[in-house]
Structure formats: C-alpha cells, structure tokens
Image (cartoon, grey):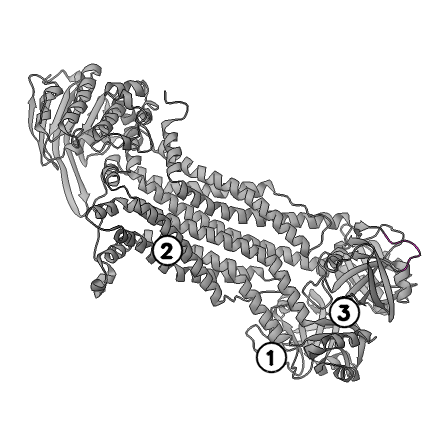
Amino acid sequence: MVGMVRALDRKLLRDLWRLKGQALAIGAVMAVGLAMFVAYFSTFTSLQRTQERYYERHRFADVFASVKRAPLSLATRLAAIPGVAQVDVRVVADVTLDLPGQPAPATGRLVSVPVPRAPMLNDLFLRRGRWMDVGRPDEVLASEAFALANGLGPGSTIPALINGRRRHLQVVGIALSPEYVYTVRPGEVIIDDRRFGVLWMGRQALGAAFDMEGGFNDVVLALSPGASEPAVIGHVDVVLRPYGGFGAIPRRLQMSNWSLTNELAQLRGFGMLVPLIFLVVAAFLLNVVLSRIVSVQREQIAALKALGYSRLELGWHYAKWSLVVGVGASVAGVAGGAWMGRGIIAMYNDFFRFPELLYRMPAGVALAGLAISLVASVGGAMGAVHRAVRLPPAEAMRPEPPAMFTRSLVERVGLAHVLGPAARMVVRNLERQPVRSATSVLGVACSAALLVLGLFFLDAITEMLRVQFDLVQRQDVTVTFVEPRGDAAVHELRRLPGVLDVEATRTVQVRLHVAQRSRQLLITGLVDTPRLQRVVDIGGRVMALPPAGLVLSRSLAEALGVEAGGSVTVEVLEGRRRTVRVPVTAIVDEYLGLSAYMRLEALRTLLREGRLVSGAHLLIDAREEAALYRRLEAMPAVAGVSSTHAMVENFVRQMDETMGVMIGFNVLFASIIAFGVVYNAARLSLSERGRDLASLRVLGYTRVEISTMLLGELAVVVVLAIPVGLVIGYGLAALVIGLFETEMYRFPVAVAPRTYAAAAVVTMGAALVSGLVVRRQLDHLDLVGVLKTRE
Amino acid sequence: MASGVAADVVFRARGLTRTYLMGEVEVHALAGVDLDLVRSELLVLLGPSGSGKSTLLNILGGLDVPTAGEVVYRDHVLTTADDRALTRYRREHVGFVFQFYNLIPSLTARENVALVTEIAADPMTPEEALGLVGLAARLDHFPAQLSGGEQQRVAIARAIAKRPDVLLCDEPTGALDSVTGVLVLEAIDRVNRELGTTTVVITHNVVVAAMADRVITLADGRITSVRPNATRRPPRDLEW
C-alpha cells in the first residue's frame, strides 16, 4: 500500500521541498505585500473606530466659538438657540510657561473646567492623579503629551506668567481631552509637545486670574439630532458678535479634529496605495514565477496526461502547488501585518492622544488579504498549466524543437566581433524570448521601483523643509503680541540683545467666504519687500505681493473654490469686524497649510486701522539667544515666542520617529521583494538551461565560462531593469504624493539622486547575492545526471 | 493469429495521415495508413527513425490526432473525440511505455505506479505490477537511483498496473543494452501472454520482431510490409 497520501500529492510535497528556496522567496514576496496591506488597512480602521468611540464617550462638542468677553447670562441665550442641546461656557487663555531647562519659553493653554467635577462637553479622561480640589486655585491637570515630553506628573510644579503675575501651578493629574487629540500651538502646523501643552484649571481660579468671574471667552455646544449646523453657527455668531465673537466653527474645522481627519485621510491614501502597489507587484511576480516553474514541468504534465489524468486533475494539482505557497504567505502576511499594525498604532499614539487605542484586525481585512493572495497565486499557475495541458501529450513530451535562433540585433548591426561566444549566447537567448526577457526586466524593475517608493519620502520632507525654512520662513524667532500695538513696538524689539533684523507683521483672525464655503484662518500682512518671511512658491520663486488684494495658498484657494482674478468675502473677526469683498490677485503654490497674504498697508486699509503690528519676525545672533529669550519673556506685551530652529528640529525628530518606522518597513520589504525576484529569475534560468550548460561543460567549457553565460543573462536583465525601475519608481512616488496631499500640508515629488542610487545599489546587491547562490548550485551541476534525466 | 473475425478487431485505422511542423519544416509523418489490430495479438512496428512509427502509436494511444483519416477503438471513434473523451480512453484502456520512460522524478517506483492504480477501475497493486517486471526489491527507489533498464521496467509496471486493454510501447529497449533489453521484453511478453493484453511494440531492432505475432514495417509514413510470424520466439532467445 502506498498509504493515505495520493501519489500526485506526494509529487506535490516533494516538488515543493525541492523548490523550497524558490517557494520561500515567492511566499516572502507575497507575504510582504499582504503584511503591508493588512497593517495599514487595520491601522486605519482601528484609528477610525478609536476616534469615533472617544468622541462619543467623552461627548466631543459639535460647535466651537471664542469671544473676547461675554457675560455669563449669555449662556442662557445660546442654550435657547433652536437645535442646541447643551452649552458649556469656559475661559480659555494662552499663557507663557517658564519650564526649567528650556531655551525658548513654552506656551500653556489654560482651559477652565468645573470644580468639583461635573459632567461637561469635551469631557476629560483622567489618566493619573486626581481632579482639582475646591479652594486650591493653583491646581491644574496637564495634558498627557505635554507632561510626557517635559517629565511632568502629579506633584510637579509649572512656573507660569498669568495675566502679568507669576504663579506656580501644581500638577495634580494627567488628562486627555477629545478636543486636544492633536495639540498644536496656535499658528503652527507641527506638534511640539515640549513647548505647547493644555492645562485644565478650575473655573473659579481661571476666571479670577483673567477677570472673567462673571463672564466667559469660549463656548462649546452640542447639537440635538437633526439640527442644522450652519443655522446654529449663524445664530451663535449673531449672539456673540456684540461681545467680540471670533466666529463659530463646526467640529469639522476644529483644529484637532481637522488634523486628525486629515491624518486619517492621508493614512487611507498613502497607507493603502503603497501596500496595494506592493501587493499588485507581488501578485504579478508570483504569477510570472509560478508560470515559469510550471513550464519547466511541461514534459511531466504531458506524461501524466498520457497516463489518463484529466486537465482538471492536473490543473488542480498545480493549483494546490500555488495554494500551499499562497496560504503560507497569507498566514505569514496577516500575522506579520497584525504585528506591524500594532506597532503603527502605538506610534500614532505618540502623535495623537487617545485614552486607549483599540487595535482591531477586521475579519474582512484578513479575508480580503487571503483572497487576494490565493487568487494571485492560483491565477499565476493556471495560465501556465493551461498552456501545458492544451498541447497534445505526444507533442508536449517530444523535446521542444530546436529553438529558432537568429543572429541577434547586436550582431546584425555589426558588433559581432566584440562579443565572445558566451556573450553571443546571452544576447541571442534574451532576444529569442522577448516576452520572457521583458517580464524578467519588468519584475526586477518593479522591485527597484518599490525601493524608490519606500525611500523617496525622506527626500520629499527634506525638500519641503528646505523651501519652507530656507526660503519662506527665514526668521529665527517669531514674536506675537498680546494685543496689536503701534509700530514703535518693533523698534523696541530691535534694541534687544542679539537682534540683527526685525520685520513687522500684522496677522488678523478672519473668516473667508466664497459662496457656501468658508474657512477661518489668519491673514498675514507682510512688509512691501520682506527679507525674513516671504511668499515663495514650491519652485523656489519669491513672489512680490501685489499692492492690493489677497494672495492665497493653493490649498486654501481649492478649499474655497476660488481662482486668481476672483474674489472672497473677508469677515474680520477682530476690531471693527468689517466684512469686505477683496479680490484674489494671485495664488501661490505652497507646501504648508492654508494661508492668505496681503501687504501690510493694504491690510491696514482693509481693517481701517493705523500703523498697528501684531507681531514681528527676528533674525538673531545665536550667541545671545538665551539672553534674548529672558528679555522677551519679561515683556508683558509679548504673548508668545517661537523659535524656527526648535520647530524644525522637532519636526525632523517627529518625522524620524514616525516616518522612520514606515520607511524602514518599506525598504525592508522592497529589499525582500528584490531578492525574491532576482533569485527566482536566476533559479529559473538554471532549471531551464541546466541541460545546455551541462552539455557545454561536457564539451570542455569551464565553470567560470558557463557561469558567465547564465549570470551574464541575469546581469543584462538587472542592468536593463534598473533605469526602468527608477522611472516607474518616480511615477509611483508622484502618484502617492498626490494622495498624500491634505489641506494641512502636501509634499513635493522630489526624488534625490541618493534615493535612486540606493535603489540601484540594493537591487544590484540582491542580484549579486542571488547570483552567488545560483553560482554555487551551478558548481555542483551533476553533468551525467543532467544529461541523462529530463524533468 | 494472422487474422480474426470482425468481433476481435480492437483497432481499425483507415487512411491515417499526419503532418506537422518541426520548426519551419513540414513533416509528413504518416501518409495514408490502413491497419487493423486484433485482440491479444502482439504487434511489432519496425522501421527506421522518421518512418512514422511513433506517430502511429501516439494516435492509437489517443496522445495525438491525425490530420486526416479515421481510427476506431472498439466502439470509440478516436479521431472525433475531444480532449475529455481521449483522456477517459487513455485512463480506462491504454497502457503506455515511453521511449524516455517519462517517470516522475520526484516519486519512487511504487509511487509512480500508484499514479495509475489510483485512477484505474480494477488495478493490481503497485507491488504486484512491479513484481511482474521483476522489481519487487526496488519499490522505494527514486528514478534517479535506478538503472535505465530498471526505469523502463517501472514504466512498464506503470503501464500494465491498470490491466489495460492495449499496451503501447515506444522503443522500450531503445536506450538499453541487450541483456537489460531482454528483461524488458520478457516483461512485455509476459503481460501479453498472461493478461491477453493487445500489445504494440515499436522498435528499429529487427531481432525483436521475432517475438511478435505480426510484424509491420513502415517507411516514409507508409506500411511497406505486413508479415505474420508462424511462431513467436520467447525474448530470452533473442540476441543482438
């Protein structure tokens, strides 16, 4: 008895074992594609679920508004607006914190909360410690990210300058809020947890500190189901306008939520396209490799057919062959993807702050991965099996007729004399099977392209930073005043230690409207010919601001649906609160954020105000930095000081942490694919040409000579593939960048030479290693055996 | 068995023609062959290489289809059968021995035979079949561990294990020395005698013809002679 395993299945197992190297390489390629797919997909769905749950459980508000100062009695009027379910009025103020060991002062956002604790919108999650006690005005809760970045915990003290008075805030607990999942300092786009944090303080204490005992300057509202958000916002604005309302915004545009939404959109775009590309490439390679493996078994298939096995049975046999590889790859891929997904989620939690991050692997994602992998692998084998079983067995068993060789193109153009016999064989062989050669080239090219795709992101960031901080924001320090001041303040700054140059700015809170669309942001007024903060497009061209009208960043223009030559309605949210129609004179392509620029003079005309400034850009002597900061901190008129250098450093560190992991994965995986492809190409050439090569050895060719023939072919393929791969890689990078674009920022399609070089070197390295492995097998070529038996 | 009653005719071929392209050359492998085979006879096809022997055998075995002409196996018209029907025909009726053995290299002798016994209706066990060809002691060897003659005998065991109605052997001794060749021919002779299997053996070795009931010679795709043997000589008496 033969036992329970059918003979055909034994053949399957033994073939798999014999080709384990190749099976492993294909399986790895497939697993890698799947792991990426599963990791990003599951991360995206997990983040989305986490966000929804958090918002729901902690009653994230629907509408947000701030106001200069409104009496508490107004809360009743706001609550009476149709569609409003709940109103919480608060005091919110940004103050300077004087944390030890920090050169530039930090900003703390104080947000009032009820003491003792009572239900509220944007309810806090208390991670550690306790709520503030009644009668202890200096007690605060600190936001988790800020506390972690600065090593704060319950019991820590934070020196703060509150409304001109120095206070020592006592941290009693660490908290999280759905309102500050993404905490970014006002006017910046980059998280800096060391220098910006949220501190929650008792309502009484904070009210007292800012003379707001009977008033409020911030309000959050929850809507009842079915309420019209624009109608409520309109009402809120009407109610708050007499008290200096800055305009209500919907949840959609609330800073933290907007950033989070953008990040999720980006994860969906970038995080799904990249793995999808990997997966498609993996499926393609699997297809190519499996079909070649099956082709090699052409005579065995014919013999089995002659013995009475049907097409269906043979088809199923090879399908199982690829299914074993596919299932193995799926299991490894899904498990690896889940592991990666957990890692990525943890990384996101350093960025965004959630009470708990729920990592869930949706069954659909795992199943989709499995299905893709199985379809790809079976599809790969089927084409070749079909070709094999289609031939009448008698014909298939006959050795293939001598292949049609012709003189190769290289020889026809008269270069024959430069080619030795080995080179001639290489060239003729490649030319004889143009489709196969092209497929090999494309396969290797794909792996090079994936390397470019994996690496280019660093180049994009570098280029963006170069444009943003070498060309646009050339100031070392940005100072913002508590209130707009006369331009004498600028001269005052010029006299401070270490200040080399000063440039005044006027920024003003506005809401821009075009038809139904609106965005709330700052218009930046710049001097006529700025030296520090300039308007520069992504091509590095410095744009002179026109004497009148607005210059909008492309993201803003697109968000509003306006073009140069059109106009926007500017609703000023400060001072005289004018609403004016202003022409859009130009659009500037920028990488960062939603921005609107005007000449200082034009902005002042629009505001109907005199020579007021709201801040200044400074160029400083680094040696006097510390002294300068001490002086700035002591100036009551100064609300905030930010250092460009610190910002860039922080950004780079953040990108290293987050992008570094992803880029690492991308490159690792692309390298695995490169190796898998090249190794398989080499192994297949060996099995297809083993007999020829053994015959040549018998005729007296040396090992080196036959290695040259086989590996020469591989080398030609790799050399042809690399430039193709680099071009494809650039194309993929452009595609991904397009999806990466959000309102918050976009990245340049910049691929640095070093990235191309790295992709080429890794691909060649993979080829070299594969070549050496195959070379070893070539050295052990069993001459008699190869000539005697046929596969 | 020079001739038989119509009921005993197993194969009936008329006007078989087969041309195919070998590279750029059109080869006329068969050019109008008429042939009847009767039950249990052992037929030897003689002829130089390129005479069309293999093509004829492949067509009889359902491995190839003629360009023109008709082949009927009992009540099956092979020439109009589709791939599915030909597969069934091979599976149920035909045992094939290939010139180059065509064993599956990843399977042992026993498993190569099992490939057939697993899909046949009334097979012997692989051990029995290998016993018939004298390989009872080499059951678990892989093709690469067997000599050429042993591989060819595994191929014969694989062909007879299903108790086929017809056994078709393409140059079964072509690659073997005479001593081994005789062992292989004895296996074929035994199957023909003991199981009554209609057998066709291709050879270009004239000596082998002596073991046949009938000898047909082909040249250039045509039958040039049909010669019945008065007596069959046992293979062990053959020498070349």
Q: Residues within 10 Å of mark 2 (few under 14, many from 20)?
A: many
Residue A653, quarter of picture: bottom right
Residue A589 seen by the camera: no
Instruction: Return the mark for residue A543.
Output: 1
Identify the chain of the residue marked 3, using the numbered disc in the image. A
Q: Can residue A242 be seen in this view?
A: yes
Residue nearest the observer in this picture, B64 or A163:
A163
Q: Do the residues labelled 1 and 3 touch (CB within 8 Å)?
A: no
Residue A24: image quadrant is top left
For residue A787, which quarter of the picture?
top left
Give the magenta range: A131-137
What amino acid is found at the position of numbered circle 3 in the picture?
Pro
Residue type at mark 1 is Met
Q: In the depicted view, which residue is nearer to us: A745 or B10?
A: A745
- Measure the alpha-carbon separation of dots 1 and 3: 33 Å
Classed neighbour count for the residue bearing mark 3: other residues with Cα under 10 Å, few (<14), some (14–19), many (≥20): many
Mark 1 nearby-residue class (10 Å; few <14, some 14–19, many ≥20): some
**Residue A14, x across and y down, in percent:** 38, 34
Q: Tell me which residue sits at (79%, 55%) in the image.
A: A153
- Lower sequence index among marks 1 and 3: 3
Name the residue tied to disc 2. A441
Residue under numbered circle 3 = A105
Can residue B232 be found in the magenta stretch?
Answer: no
- Provide residue A758's location: percent of width, then percent of height: 46, 61
Chief secondary structure of the magenta span?
Answer: loop
Quadrant containing the N terminus of chain B in the rendered view: top left
Both labels 2 and 1 in a single chain:
yes
Q: Which amino acid does label 2 sit on?
A: Val
| A686 horizontally vs A111: left or right | left
Chain at numbered mark 2: A
Residue A13 x/y as whole percent? 40, 33
Q: Which of marks 2 and 1 is nearer the N terminus?
A: 2
